[in-house]
């Protein structure tokens, strides 16, 4: 079995998380710049004397396909390196991945990872 691990993290933590994932043997990561909010509901900022609400905060979404036996190590690496102890550190989502195909070779599933 395979899993898709999706993590939403603070942008300034991307390099640290990438290095930690490489150390646990992750061969590939997809990173996307996204915007969102959770419990923090954004925040207010002051610009040229005017206060305005920033509803969506910049985040990085990581997508990592791994075999079942790697999920714990991947989650642990993300938690250790992305955490600041402050609100807005992010979340990790894990779900089953039915099939993976490497386009170049046609390899399937674990061989394609």
Image: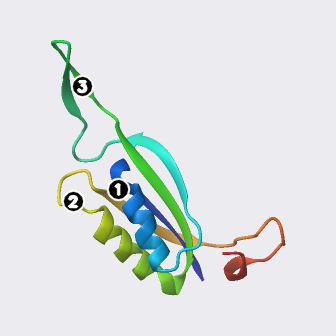
Residue 95, given in percent of the width and then of the height, sits at 50, 69
Which residue is rendered at x = 26% and y = 63% of the image?
Answer: 83
Residue 43, given in percent of the width and then of the height, sits at 21, 34
Q: Earlier in the sequence, mark 1 or mark 2?
A: 1
Q: Earlier in the sequence, mark 3 or mark 2?
A: 3
Sort mark 1 into few (<14), some (14-19) or many (20+) by Cα contacts within 10 Å: some
Distance between mark 1 and mark 3 Cα atoms: 24 Å
Whether residue 58 sits left or right of residue 39 in the image: it is right
Label 3: state its secondary structure. Answer: strand
Residue 22, given in percent of the width and then of the height, sits at 49, 73
CB atoms at circles 3 and 2 under 8 Å apart?
no
Q: Which residue is mark 2?
A: 84
Distance between mark 1 and mark 2 Cα atoms: 9 Å
Which residue is rendered at x = 37% and y = 48% of the image?
Answer: 11
Residue 70, given in percent of the width and then of the height, sits at 49, 82
Which residue is rendered at x = 45% and y = 43% of the image?
Answer: 34
Q: Which residue is mark 3?
A: 53
In this rendered view, identify the residue nearer to me: 27 or 106.
Answer: 27
CB atoms at circles 1 and 3 under 8 Å apart?
no
Sort mark 3 into few (<14), some (14-19) or many (20+) by Cα contacts within 10 Å: few
CB atoms at circles 1 and 2 under 8 Å apart?
yes
**112 above or below 6?**
below
- Of all residues, the one furthest to the top in this rendering is 49
Q: In the image, which disc is placed on residue 13?
A: 1
Label 1: state its secondary structure. Answer: helix
Sort mark 2 into few (<14), some (14-19) or many (20+) by Cα contacts within 10 Å: few
Which residue is rendered at x = 70% and y = 78% of the image?
Answer: 109
Nearest to the eye among marks 3 and 2: give it.
Answer: 2
Q: In the image, which disc is placed on residue 67?
A: none
Image coloring type: rainbow
């Amino acid at each position: 079995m395979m899993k898709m691990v999706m993590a939403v993290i603070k942008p300034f933590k991307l390099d640290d998380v990438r290095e930690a994932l490489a150390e646990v043997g992750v061969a590939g990561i997809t990173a996307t710049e996204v915007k969102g909010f959770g419990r923090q509901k954004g925040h207010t900022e002051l610009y040229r004397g005017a206060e305005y609400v920033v509803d969506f905060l910049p985040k990085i979404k990581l997508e990592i396909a791994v075999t079942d036996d790697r999920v714990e190590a991947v989650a642990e690496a993300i938690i250790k390196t992305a955490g600041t102890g402050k609100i807005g550190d992010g979340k990790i989502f894990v779900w089953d991945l039915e099939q993976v195909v490497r386009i170049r070779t046609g390899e399937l599933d674990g061989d394609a990872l």
